[in-house]
Image (spheres, helix red, strand yellow):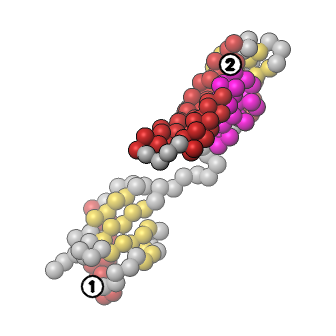
Amino acid sequence: MGCSPVYADCISRTTLYESWRLYRWHARLYARTKEETATSYTESNSLRLPFYTGCIIIVRPTQTQKGNHMKTFNIYKHPTQGFEAVKVGFSWPAFFFGIIWMLVKKLWGLAGLWFAMYVGLSLIEAVTDQSQESGAQALVYLILAAGYFALWLVPAFKGNKWREENLSKRGYELLSSAQAETPDAAVAERAKMA
């Protein structure tokens, strides 16, 4: 019984000749070794994974340039305080640091609200801990877990929007958007244009 390989090529499509050549090479290799473990395939820097069915899958990883991750920033300008760049989308610092991030970014009201909600959830948890074990207690713990999870996750998704609204309230004016690796690079790019 012959081996029918499946190729998943993430970089470029292979020509028919290359596919035929690789098929023949794998068929000979599989017939010789008949091994069940994954081994490295050195000719194309791919991974050869033989399966129990006799099929071989080759996956070539995509190659990205390290340090070339362009992000979109909205650039704001204040008449006296200068420029501020706010990344569009998910906020990793807000994800990891939550209330501390809000305080650093001068989101005082939201930081206070988040602190009050944490205190409220902690009080509910303390009361629930002292109550009798029941199905209702399990439901309350499930709701508490969802509440803590939301308090942790919402700033990551909404944090940059909150920051943009806060800058607008503090007198900053939206100038433009810029593609850059860091906020400082986005501000420098905008400063060159002005």
Give the quarter of the image for residue 124: top right
Mark 1 surroundings within 10 Å by alpha-carbon count, few (fewer than 14), some (14 through 19), many (20 or more): few
- According to the picture, the residue beneath numbered tag 2 turns out to be 166
Going by the numbered disc 2, the residue's amino acid type is Asn
Q: In which quadrant of the rendered image does the C terminus lie? A: top right
In magenta stretch: residue 181? no
- According to the picture, the residue beneath numbered tag 1 turns out to be 31
| Furthest residue in direction bottom, as rendered | 32
Mark 2 surroundings within 10 Å by alpha-carbon count, few (fewer than 14), some (14 through 19), many (20 or more): some
Residue 96, x across and y down, in percent: 64, 43
Distance Cα–Cα, label 2 vs label 1:
66 Å
Identify the residue at horizontal 51%, vertical 56% (top origin): 63
Q: Is residue 145 visible?
A: no
Residue 174, x across and y down, in percent: 66, 16
Give above or below for 184 relative to 138. Answer: above
Q: Which mark is residue 59?
A: none
| Furthest residue in direction right, as rendered | 80
The main secondary structure of the magenta stretch is helix
Element type at mark 2:
helix
Q: Is residue 151 visible?
A: yes
The residue stretch that appears in magenta = 90-115
